[in-house]
Structures are given as structure tokens and as C-alpha cells.
Image: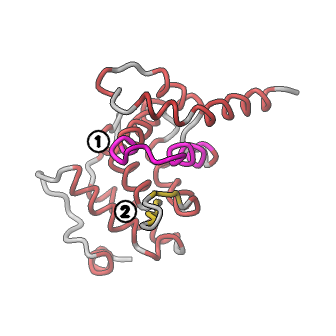
């Protein structure tokens, strides 16, 4: 798909970054690309998202710890995988959507524990803003772990982090994912036994 076709089909205003682009601009464009119904059915759409990122997010922002970029990507990917039931007034995870988007996050996390922590911080803060929907973070963690996006070491590093600026909502996030951590650790022990 050409750049002009991406702009036309997704409603983006530009594929060229400007010096004043903020994470919110990247987020809104990622949201639009990820919400395209063709995304879940067409692997070409995934390539279009990657192309858009490569063309619009400077390499310096994607490399290193890439704090802002990874957090923006994690929130966009997760947000596009949620469903809100207005009758029950609750969010649920559309696991198949998150699974379809996992390769995007995995590509940029690149099996780096520090980068994995950035994704987990983004989810922690997102759940805090959403007032910690029941079992949602556990379901997201399960999906990220089962799709090899975040390794056990990344989850443990997030859990052990005591950085003051990352504590908002963390206590509730840890408590809500206790069963996930127990399961993950037991799963790791089972894998190590002969």
C-alpha cells in the first residue's frame, strides 16, 4: 500500500513527522491504524503500521529505552483490543485482537528487559486511569506472556522496581495480578523439571 493510500484509507493527515509531534499525535495515529477493521484480517495492515512507525517516529525515539514510544505503543495496542460493555459498565479484553497486535509490541520490545518494563508501566498507568477493571490486567499479562512479548524476567523486573515515579497504581496492579505471578512462577518451575 502506498503512503497516499494509507492516508486516504485511515484518515491520517500526514505520514511525515513534524518537529512538534507529541506522543499524543503518535498515539492518535496509532489508534486510527489499529482500529481499522482490516487490521485483524490482513497481515499487510500490520506492515502498514510498522511502515508508519518507521516513517513517523524518529529512530532515536524508538531506540534505547524508548520510554515514551513504547508506552504509547502499548497503550494504543491494548486500547484497540478492549471492548466496553455499556450495560455492565465494564471493559473486557478481546484476546484475539491483542494476540494479532502482539507482534508489533514484540518487534519494538526486542526481548530487552528495560523495554519490557516500559510496556508494563504503561499498562499499570492505563489500568489506574481506568480504575482497575476486574481481571483485565491479569488477562493482558497472560496474553503478553503467552505470546512471548514479555518474558518472566521482564515481569519480575517490573514487580521489583521501586522507582518512586512509577508507583502510582502499582500496589493495586500487583494485587490484581497475584494469581498471574503465581501461575507464571509455577509454570517456570514445571518447565525446569525433567
Image point (52%, 57%), residue name: 93
Task: Check if residue 54 falls in the magenta segment.
Answer: no
Question: In the image shown, does 192 or 123 lie closer to the viewer?
Answer: 123
Q: Earlier in the sequence, mark 1 or mark 2?
A: 2
Q: Quadrant of residue 67?
A: top left
Look at the image and name its color scheme.
Answer: secondary structure
Q: Position of residue 158 (x, y in %)?
A: 47, 28
Quarter holding the N terminus is bottom left
Magenta residues: mostly which secondary structure? helix
* Residue at the limit of the structure toward the front, as seen here: 87
Which region is colored magenta?
126-145
Dot in front, 1 or 2: 1
Depth check, front residue: 170 or 192: 170
Q: Residue at x 16, y 53 (%)?
A: 21
Q: Which mark is residue 68?
A: 1
Q: Give the image quarter of residue 138.
A: top right
Residue at x 54% of width, y 26% of height: 156
The magenta stretch spans residue 133: yes
Crowding at mark 2 (Cα within 10 Å: few <14, some 14-19, many 20+): some
Secondary structure beneath dot 1 equals helix
Can you identify the residue that label 2 sits on? 51
**What is the spatial separation of the Cα atoms under label 1 and label 2, in whole angstroms?**
19 Å
* Residue 148, quarter of picture: top right
Residue 150 to residue 157: above or below: below
Looking at the picture, how far across and down is residue 63, in whole percent? Answer: 34, 39
Quadrant for the C terminus, please.
Answer: top right
Amino acid at each position: 500500500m502506498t503512503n497516499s493510500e494509507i492516508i486516504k484509507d485511515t484518515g491520517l493527515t500526514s505520514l511525515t513527522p513534524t518537529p512538534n509531534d507529541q506522543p499524543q499525535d503518535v498515539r492518535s495515529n496509532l489508534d486510527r491504524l489499529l482500529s481499522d477493521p482490516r487490521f485483524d484480517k490482513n497481515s499487510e495492515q500490520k506492515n502498514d503500521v510498522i511502515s508508519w512507525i518507521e516513517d513517523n517516529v524518529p529512530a532515536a525515539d524508538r531506540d534505547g529505552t524508548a520510554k515514551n514510544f513504547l508506552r504509547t505503543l502499548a497503550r494504543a495496542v491494548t486500547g484497540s483490543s478492549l471492548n466496553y460493555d455499556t450495560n455492565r459498565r465494564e471493559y473486557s479484553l478481546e484476546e484475539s485482537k491483542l494476540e494479532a497486535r502482539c507482534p508489533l509490541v514484540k518487534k519494538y520490545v526486542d526481548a530487552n528487559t528495560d523495554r519490557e518494563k516500559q510496556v508494563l508501566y504503561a499498562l499499570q498507568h492505563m489500568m489506574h486511569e481506568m480504575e482497575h477493571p476486574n481481571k483485565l490486567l491479569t488477562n493482558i499479562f497472560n496474553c503478553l506472556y503467552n505470546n512471548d512479548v514479555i518474558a518472566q524476567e521482564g515481569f519480575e523486573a517490573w514487580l521489583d522496581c521501586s522507582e518512586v515515579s512509577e508507583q502510582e497504581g502499582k500496589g493495586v496492579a500487583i494485587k490484581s495480578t497475584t494469581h498471574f505471578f503465581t501461575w507464571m512462577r509455577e509454570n517456570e518451575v514445571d518447565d525446569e523439571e525433567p
